[in-house]
Amino acid sequence: MKPIPCVLFAVVFSSAALLTGCRQLSAEAEADDAPSQPVPVRAARATVTTLRPSSDLIGTVVLIPERTSVIAAQAEGRIAPISVVEGQSVEAGDVLIEVDLRPAEARLAGVRAAEQRAQATLAKLEHGPRTEEVEAARQDTLQLAAAARALEAKLDAMRALHEKGDLSDVEFGQAQARFDDAEAESRAAEARLRLLEAGPRAEEIAEARAELAVAEADVAAQELEVEFCTIRSPIDGVVIQLAARAGAYVTQSDVLAIVADTSELFVQARIPSTHFSQVKPGAPADVWTAPRADTALHGTVARLGPRANPDTGDVDVFVSIKNDGGQLVPELACRVRVWLPELGDVLAIPVAAVADRDGTPVVTVIRDGKAFEQPVTLGISTKDQIQAVGGLEAGDWVAIEGGYGLPEGCPVRFISEAAEGTTAPGADD
């Protein structure tokens, strides 16, 4: 695995005094030809173990988009009563906001009247004329035809007088006009009778049906508008935001409220690019809601962001957390620990054993009771341990306290247990 760069610090146990003492004792030993007094150090062995690394991040609680409903106005009007307040828990179907119904109900009454008129027209065409209407038209036709024949006979008699000169042109013309009018009325009556007897045309019925369909659609749309005046919650959740105000006039698409299911939330954080390839959906994660909180909320990585930050290369990670105790609220800052895949059979040493020497990680190795500085190549790290990729072997003793900055070959003595169940050789009782 490629080493992961990190800044390491060694805990120094009276290093300046110990270093001075070691050097002074060495000088006296050379002068007096006597052994130097060993410097006390704490040490641990390099061991082969399994590391479970993690990435510690700072995150923010956010809503889960799929569990959030943005509620917008679907009907124009003035807001009437508001039935909820921000932070209130609601169930699906609960009334949140109402818009004044009266204008919408008036429009509904108008389109319903148009629908009834269209229904009546269609019914009249489909049933055709009544028998009484046909009979009345037939009688009108007969009467008008008889009147026309009577006028025609009178006109014929007047024509003979007109030809002899016994009747003026004016009188004859008037008689001719009366006959023409009567004949036209008779023909019109005959035409009306034929139409009644034939019944309505198919095209007229189809047109009436289409007009009725339009009227029915208008009614359905207006009924929906009336329904939209009562705004209900589509989900169980909490009113996160309430933008509506009583008396305000709203139009379609105006955002009025946000309702979210907060029983489960996301914690959004940014994971470094060095760890991105190791994080997969489903990876375990822990969340602390307070800087010094001891109890962690356990969750899993739900998804990763689709893009990296162009400046840092960091990628958004979304950790899904159950909010059973209501400890989480949107916008709350928290600490996040995303667990990375375990790394087995690696050589590891305590983090406290590593120091920095001009940009190079080093450790103090204890061999034959003496201290030697050793450059090391590091890999994956955890809170307490770090992988030693190169420079050490299993079983090597490394100083974890009191060993920083000692001269090469400085005598040392162990003052603590090196590892669980193993006592450092020469340790104080």
Image: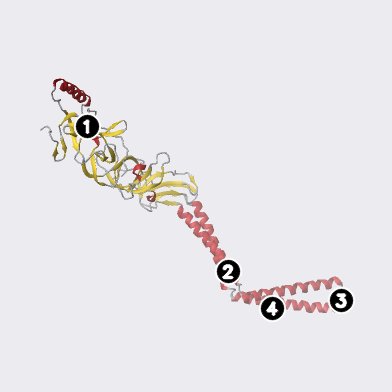
Disc 4: which residue? 142
The x, y position of residue 84, in whole percent, is 38, 46
Q: Nearer the viewer, residue 185 or 411?
A: 411
The amino acid sitting under disc 4 is Leu
Instruction: Name the N-terminal-most of marks 2 and 3.
Output: 3
The amino acid sitting under disc 1 is Phe
Mark 2 or mark 3, which is nearer to you? 2
Q: Are marks 2 and 1 in contact (CB under 8 Å)?
A: no
Disc 3: which residue? 162
Disc 4 and disc 2: Cα gap in Å?
33 Å
Q: Is residue 264 above or below residue 16?
A: below
Task: Give me the disc on residue 206.
Answer: 2
Mark 3 or mark 1, which is nearer to you? 1
Instruction: Name the N-terminal-most of marks 2 and 1.
Output: 2
Query: 428 left or right of 406?
Result: left
The x, y position of residue 192, in whole percent, is 66, 73
The x, y position of residue 329, in whole percent, is 34, 43
Q: Please, what secondary structure does the residue beneath circle 4 have? A: helix
Q: Are marks 2 and 3 in contact (CB under 8 Å)?
A: no
Give the quadrant of residue 403: top left
Disc 1: which residue? 372
Query: 343 left or right of 141?
Result: left
Q: Nearer the viewer, residue 246 or 274?
A: 274
